[in-house]
Image: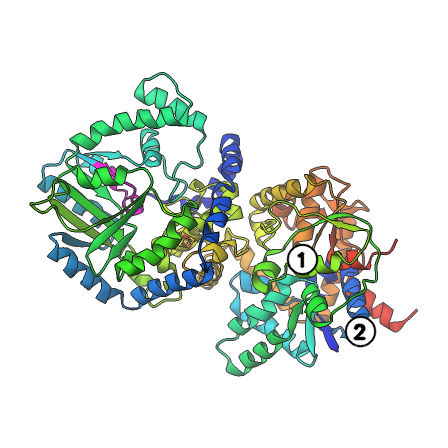
Amino acid sequence: MESRAHRFRRNIAEALANPVLQANLSKAKGKFVEKRAQAIQELDDFEATREAAREIRDRVLANLDLWLETFEANARARGATVLWAKDGNEVSRLVVEIAKRHGVKKVVKSKSMLSEEAGLNQALLAAGIEPVETDLGEYILQINGYEPPSHIIAPVVHKSLDEIADLFARTHRTPRKTEIAALTREARQVLREHFLTAEMGVTGGNFLIAETGSVALVTNEGNGRMVTTLPRVHVAITGIEKIVPTLEDLSTLMRLLPRSATGQSISNYVSVLTGTKNPAELDGPEHLYFILVDNGRTRLLGSDYQPMLRCIRCGACMNHCPVYQTIGGQAYGWVYPGPMGSVLTPLLLGLEKAHDLPYAATLCNQCGVVCPVKIPLPELLRNLREEADKRRLRPWRERLALRAWAWIALRPSLYALASRLLVRYLAWLAEGRGGISVLAAAPGWTMGRNFPAPEGETFRTRYRMRKRGP
Amino acid sequence: MRVGLLVTCLVDLMRPRIGFAALELLEAAGCTVIVPEQQTCCGQPAWNNGDRANAARLAKKLITEFEGCEYLVAPSGSCADHVRHGYPRILADEPTWQARAQALAAKTHELADFLVRIACLQKMPGNFAGRITYHDSCSGLRGLGVKEQPRALLQKLPALELVEMRGAEECCGFGGTFSVKFGAVSAAIAERKCHQAQALGVDAIVGGDLGCLLNIEGKLRRMGDAQTKVMHFAEVLTAKD
Ligand code: SF4
């Protein structure tokens, strides 16, 4: 997917100026937050489960190469082919090759963020192969001109029912419906046809289980099952970090994933798929391929950013993020939005292409406390800021202002003088009113709110006067 | 108890009365309060903007000024959290300094936390009357576990009614320099906070971090609400009619 992260500021301005989006966002806000809060109550000890999950993920990352080899060996033993992709282009190339080898004309897809990273749909179209998204949200985006997703688990959370009703009526040339059940039924009818005619299914993978060589799919719509059982060929594309050692470990992570994501105790479907169809079985793919993708991930191993690879893509961090709630997911400009996106996008694409993202956070740590695998997201964001500063990616004015302020703050007498002058200046601007409505030195502040007037003299001045006595 | 008061740069500049209120509360709790005159800023803006070198310089400066005190107390969860958790990390590469940072961190407290848990202040100097709601600032809440402490103090005022707003623990959108860099987003987040408080019809929104309070006050006034007061809990606890 082409990145629009470099024009983040423009994306934000557009998002804030879009009344339909703003209305949809405020309606969606909090939907997942409350459900999650209730769902984690069901666990005897949420914090201990989180700690166990973190430990599992760290154990894998500490020896990722070995776990990947174990997975590869076990998957091969069950008849799967394991392929490795360095980047998104390689993913696309491999999928197109597989499709051609098996004479595929149509591909049904279940949700896969990696295929978004790779821009797979465009590559398939270019090769004359028809991709059909079958996750309802992804399908909606596809028929709306391949609109980018705004959330990693709820890709159309930014859309209203009305918009979708219009879109369906227009695309399917059917009478306009506004009932969710009716719309879903219509999508099912359309998709059923595709399930039955596609020769190949493409999915992501929530987890890869090393001991069995399986892929686990966590879904709510059942489309994942159709995609992986009806077509002759199944291609699962995941990041190399998605490994868990055992089924036991999978069950620990599964206690947290649906609860953190949608507030469900368990998703409607959890499929653990192992190997190709054997002669005694009635369904399942004859050919199973795994494409394990690096796309910048190995660079993070052993770095300060390694904890980011623990991510299990639950979306809790964005659901709880005040910035995400305000600007929506598309503004972040690439596949991953919210706090995890603000860390991941610069790391995977290059900080120079997305250096505004790490600054788009209040560092409130709402994300850090809900993350089921305890990724210290604010700390990673701060680290990225440090790197952006070091590499001089930030505007020189910003760097200069910061340095000048620090230089003064290190010199108490100068600081006392400067703050006294600043207070006078601010008081003059406020002209005896309670606040300042345009502050030239910080126009960003007064764009949407007043800057309160200072009380008067600084504390320092008044304290000294008081100590001297009347 | 010899307590060093970290006034904080924002209080110094914008709301000295919060500094004096903190002083009054600490003295009411029987502390001897020292206000190091050389103090400026804890350096959090440098740290949060990626300027590690200056964050370290400012940290060392503050450590030197306060390490002689028995406690460091700040009327700000954000600054106290920065000293407690930021300093040892910033100075991680300099073992002697890190040790000094850790020693100071261990005796650093946010004001309400200190008054409740260490100084055990029982009687409040003020007699504020009115209906208020409390906004939990992020660093104090999630960094230092400040939640019940300010409420416990506020509820000692007989004529004060405390009501909880929806989303009291949600960020107000301040975020330090974020509020200037992404002003429009910041103000939009603040607006939600204001609506949640206004829905309760309170006389005042009370909090423990001046950054958040300036943000909320600025937004309320821009929204045309000149009525709802925005106060630090130290001001409320010392207010006399
Ligand atoms: S960073 Fe944590 S909270 Fe965010 S998606 Fe990943 S696992 Fe979930």
Instruction: Inspect the magenta stretch and tell me whether residue A112 lies in it.
Output: yes
- Percent of width and height locating residue B12: 74, 62
| Vertical placement of residue B19 versus A83, above or below | below
- Residue located at (44% from left, 46% from top): A263
Give the magenta range.
Answer: A108-121
* Residue farthest right in this picture: A470
In what element is the residue under mark 2? Answer: loop
Residue type marked 1? Asp
- Report the side of A221 relative to A73 (left or right): right
Q: Quick check: is A330 in the magenta stretch?
A: no
Task: Identify the mark nearer the N-term, 1 or 2.
Answer: 2
Residue B235 visible: yes
Tell me whether marks 1 and 2 sit on the same chain. yes
Front residue of A421 and A215:
A215
Q: Nearer the viewer, mark 1 or mark 2?
A: 2
Q: CA distance from mark 1 to mark 2?
A: 24 Å
Q: Is label 1 in a helix, a strand or a loop?
A: loop
Residue depicted at 52% across the width and 35% down the height? A27
Question: Residue under circle 1?
Answer: B209
Observer-nearest residue: A467 or B197? Answer: B197
Determine which residue is flagged by label 2: B30
**How has the structure been colored for display?**
rainbow
Chain letter of the residue carrying label 1: B
Asked if one can make out residue A403 in the rendered structure from this viewpoint, the answer is: no
Within 10 angstroms of label 2, few (less than 14), some, or many (20 or more) residues? Answer: some
Q: Quadrant of the N terminus of chain A?
A: top left
Residue B187 drawn at (x, y percent): 61, 44
Query: To which chain does the residue with label 2 belong?
Result: B
Q: Which residue type does callout 2 highlight?
A: Gly
Where residue A419 sits: x, y (%)? 73, 62
Question: Taking B171 as reference, is B124 above or below it?
Answer: below
